[in-house]
Amino acid sequence: MITTNYLIIGSGVAGLTFAIKIADRFPDKKITIATKANADESNTKYAQGGIAIVTDKDEDSYQKHIQDTLICGDGLCDEEVVKMVVTEGPKRLKELISWGAQFDKNSEGNLDLGKEGGHSENRVVHHKDQTGSEIERAILMQVYQKENITVLDHHFAIDLITENNRCLGASILNQKTNEITNYQSEITILATGGIGHLYGHTTNPIIATGDGIAMASRAHATITEMEFIQFHPTALYDTSTGSKFLISEAVRGFGAYLRTKNGHRFMKDYDSREELASRDIVSQSIDLELKKSGDDCVYLDCTHLDLAAFIKHFPMIYKHCKNIGIDISKDWIPVVPAQHYLCGGITVDKNGKTSIENLFACGECSRTGLHGANRLASNSLLEALVYSDKIYSYLANTTISSSTSKTIISDWKSETKPEIDSNYLATLKAKLQLLMRQNAGIVRYDSDLLKAKKQLLLWQDEMKKIAETHQISAAYYELLNMIAVATLIVEQSIVRKENRGGFIKFNSSK
Ligand code: FAD
Ligand code: SIN
């Protein structure tokens, strides 16, 4: 067993920014970050559009950003939380800049502000179309400079250790040695990100398998609003499954049009904000158009835009399209909606505390009340920054009652059992992804959800039985977690009766 003061699971924006602050405040305390892939691999790294922050108080105001967030959340946001997050944005941006993150400026030397769906003003602070990668670079560099932080990459957290509703740490599998070690910590922070790979078709990287939510669920933490899955309207269309390249919403903010194969600008038929309606509305409109036409995709038309300015703002998107034979000055980009973000998650209060003592959750795995039924574009990085600061401030000013030093945590027993057939896991994962796409997508039906729940419960039993006779692995746990999180999504979709934001369900069958 290894002891640490703070155990952080996940190395995206949520985990790393908390680590930097707590390490500075308590130089004598030990901070351990466990992360299951390379340290920089995260949803954070792929964020394109930017961070929604009110910086230009002449044109914009906190009130407008608050209002846009509330409209997008379709009546289910916690207004107090929305106010808190929006008004703290500028302080968190200053901090990011002080850590070395760079953001684009206009010719007057002010921050260049992009626009995305649901925003009434230009307020998205960005670094070209690679905002997340710039942030991850800067904060990881800060983390590596702190002597009291240990980063354990390729370390997969498999379960929380709890006793009487108190978290004592976590069991972690070192993927390089296959050893499982219990980490005893005074405070544990889940910062494990999203769930995209439950759907297969997703903008998320391969690490997004909902592990933190599944672990918290096994420990009986409160988990809510899992039915609110956000589908991004414009993932690049291709026929493969797996991660999809994102065409940022900021491209529509820059003036691109959505068209059917025949050239019809269909968003005019659905919403007065046209291509810049909120994400739920654009995705649902595309879904309807595709069902009507039987086509596989719709198109994003950038051909009328200033090419030089486009390349300056979106160099990665331009290059990616070019590499696959799409010349955006002449060709339309084929796009489809794909899973992008989870609005619900592990329920936390305004200090990031979960329902389990000494366990906090931050970032995409948490449910704070900011997003309600649909997240406003570029509010996610902002939420993670504000909440990691809230958790830090709370812990910096509170004496934690900790019984961990007295509690004996028994070591993990290693047993020699046969390995699980990797083909079996891959096949079951593909079946799960298909089940989620077919039954828990943009439009859901109660009858499908009930059938899906039955199947998920069967797979849960099957997975439990396998663990009795085989050696567990990270791949096994990822699939177990994906099935557990899928079950939460399906169950909570069944329970929600009214359609809100990104959630549409019919009581009939298809
Ligand atoms: P992540 O950044 O996903 O980090 C999670 C970490 O947890 C990873 O390091 C992962 O390896 C680790 N982990 C997971 N499970 C385990 C485990 N079992 N054991 C150990 N480690 C584990 N939001 C915006 O606000 N603006 C944008 O422009 C924007 N663009 C986006 C573009 C794309 C393509 C994507 C995918 C998302 C985008 N988002 C955007 C959403 C935003 O990037 C994420 O919601 C946010 O970065 C999540 O940060 P996080 O720290 O909570 O999680
Ligand atoms: C994008 O750039 O379109 C993604 C923005 C977000 O998810 O907030």
Image (spheres, rainbow, N blue to C red):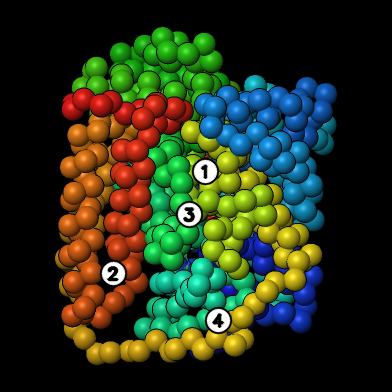
The answer to the question of whether label 2 and label 4 lie on touching residues, with beta carbons closer than 8 A, is no
Left or right? Give the position of 266 relative to 372: left
The answer to the question of whether label 3 and label 1 lie on touching residues, with beta carbons closer than 8 A, is no
Relative to 144, does residue 178 appear above or below in the rendering?
below
Q: Secondary structure at mark 3?
A: loop
Relative to 166, does residue 487 appear above or below in the rendering?
above
Q: CA distance from mark 2 to mark 3?
A: 24 Å
Q: Amino acid at mark 2?
A: Tyr
Q: Quadrant of residue 410?
A: bottom left
Say the numbered circle drawn on residue 476. Answer: 2
Q: Nearer the viewer, mark 4 or mark 1?
A: 4
Disc 4 designates what residue?
184
Q: Nearer the viewer, mark 3 or mark 4?
A: 3
Disc 1 designates what residue?
316
Say the numbered circle drawn on residue 222. Answer: 3
Q: Is residue 59 visible?
A: yes
* Circle 3 residues within 10 Å: few <14, some 14–19, many ≥20: some
Relative to 255, does residue 234 appear above or below in the rendering?
below
Q: Is residue 106 visible?
A: no
Q: Amino acid at mark 4?
A: Gln
Q: CA distance from mark 4 to mark 1?
A: 42 Å
In the image, residue 407 lies at what x, y percent? Answer: 55, 86
Label whose residue precedes the other's in the sequence (2 or 1): 1
